[in-house]
Amino acid sequence: MQQAYQKLARKLEELGQLEQIMGILHWDQEVIMPRGATQARAGQIASLAGVAHEKQTDPQIGELLDQLESGSLSDLDPYELCNIRETRRAYDRETKVPMELVQELAELGSKGHHIWAKAREENKYSDFAPVLERLIELQKQWAHYIEPDQPPYDVLMDIYERDLTVERVDPIFERLKVELVPLIRAIQESDYQPDTSFLQGEFSVAKQEALGRTISEALGFDFNKGRMDVSVHPFCGGADPTDVRITTRYGTDNFMESLFAVIHETGHALYEQGRMERDRALPVSEALTTGIHESQSLFWERMISKQKAFCDHYMELFTETFPDSLKGVNSQAFYEAINICRPTFIRVESDEVTYPMHIILRYEIEKGIFDDTYKVSDLPEVWNNKMQEYLGIRPATDTEGILQDVHWSGGAFGYFPSYTFGAMYACQFYNAMKQETPDLENWIRDGRFQSIRQWLSQKIHVKGKLLSTDALLKEVTGEALSPAHFIAYLKNKYHEIYRLSSSV
Ligand code: ZN
């Protein structure tokens, strides 16, 4: 058994390293590559992806898996068993789908991206609709090859957030809707609205960068095993836990956008840097799911850095860095200003209270696409009606509505729910930490972030893919995912900020 396992592990390691090279190429493309190299790079990436695919579908992997699964697995440890399990899942996914379908999806995904970008710019949904229609058709076929007995949308969600099904998501999202729609309305109608004027002004990029680096390092980002650069869309990438690269972007009219992007990506980076010591090129050490990854970025961005104690700790540094704007502003006013809640058309610009409504809207549309409730031609209308119902605003253009997100243009359906599941996990993890550490807010006020990072690392980061999401939640928080934590958190926080009566 050990011999077969070692053989498999060597193959997986090679594959893992190819993916790491891909990570560096991707980072290079987004951060420093000359624009003129776009086409050449696309060719390089396609070639490398081809090599990786060949290795992934190597029949020898199939044989080794068969051999291992039919034998006695008692001399393998849980890490090794996890690697076998994960490899089986990936191998089946790569080999069950005919090559022609894989290729058509890849080609239409990249062509679709260009068509979508142009349609969004010109506000012409009708130009994008035929591509969208075909992508949906292809994804239905793909899902059928993977799991012929399951609803296609469940199969697609499972790519990003393992074990999510419509049956599980529906009641959770219904509950969020019932609780959050009235809360959002009450916030909008409140007589008290925080002053945000001091967040606008002139903020030098050099000062923003220094501030971002200071805070990222204080939260625990190891610059010896990571970098921070600039890109159009902030992300966390790189190669392996010793080479984790985050990016942000700077505008000179505010410093919030770059700072919270840095903190968000630092949260992702701490997960990567905190991975287990062994098997670092093997599946077991990798992040559990998209939603759990997002829980780590949101943990730092929302649960930690958007709370009052964090503002208390950093107010002096903020004021010292930007005295023209912040002189005389106290940390309570600052805290209220950074937590302003205002419905907006654009998901990525929305706050933590309205964000879930953007996700639920997309989830309901995706679900309706795949169970044939909605026709592609009806989607802009469906989108606008739901926006009106959930957030009380109606986009005047499709650019501000259905055409705003990149995901569908590349054929990614089922991704969106993982954002809100990440937010709910983050909140539940925070409450568990607070249960164990009643002094948590004082830790934050004193800047003792290392203890927080260690807690997350020991309980979540080093666990890799050893446990299922449900099992991890139970182990860390003592219970399965419950939206009650998230709802109570939002209600308490925003009732206080907006001076609402407790009946909402
Ligand atoms: Zn993220």
Image (cartoon, rainbow, N blue to C red):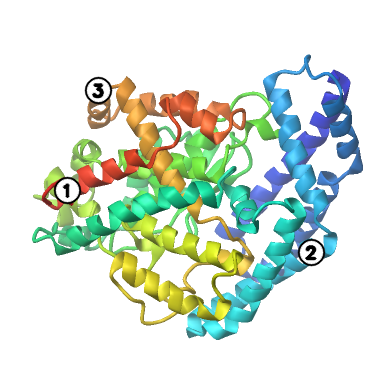
Inspect the image, locate mark 2, and give the three-letter code of the amino acid beneath it. Answer: Leu
The circle drawn on residue 101 is 2
* CA distance separating discs 1 and 3: 23 Å
Q: Nearer the viewer, residue 407 or 233?
A: 407
- Residue 227 screen position, x and y as percent: 51, 43
Which residue carries the number 3 mark? 439
Question: Considering the numbered disc 2 on the image, is that residue within a helix, a strand or a loop?
Answer: helix
- Estimate how packed mark 1 is, as few (under 14), some (14 to 19) or many (20 or more) residues with alpha carbons within 10 Å: some
Q: Is mark 2 within 8 Å of ligand 1?
A: no
- In this view, 49 is above or below 425: below
Q: In the image, is 292 to the left or to the right of 3?
A: left
Q: Residue at x 55, y 26 (%)?
A: 462
Inspect the image, locate mark 1, and give the three-letter code of the amino acid beneath it. Answer: His
Q: Is residue 110 something that shows in the picture? A: no
Q: Nearer the viewer, residue 383 or 251?
A: 383
Mark 3 or mark 2, earlier in chain: 2
- Estimate how packed mark 2 is, as few (under 14), some (14 to 19) or many (20 or more) residues with alpha carbons within 10 Å: some
Q: In the image, is 237 to the left or to the right of 264?
A: right
* CA distance separating discs 3 and 2: 55 Å
Q: In the image, is 193 to the left or to the right of 309?
A: left
The circle drawn on residue 495 is 1
> In which quarter of the view is residue 20 placed?
top right
> In which quarter of the view is residue 10 placed?
top right
Q: Is residue 484 something that shows in the picture? A: yes
**Tag in front: 1 or 3:** 1
- Residue 346 screen position, x and y as percent: 38, 67
- Estimate how packed mark 3 is, as few (under 14), some (14 to 19) or many (20 or more) residues with alpha carbons within 10 Å: few
Question: Considering the numbered disc 1 on the image, is that residue within a helix, a strand or a loop?
Answer: helix
Mark 2 or mark 1, earlier in chain: 2
Mark 1 or mark 3, earlier in chain: 3
The circle drawn on residue 131 is none
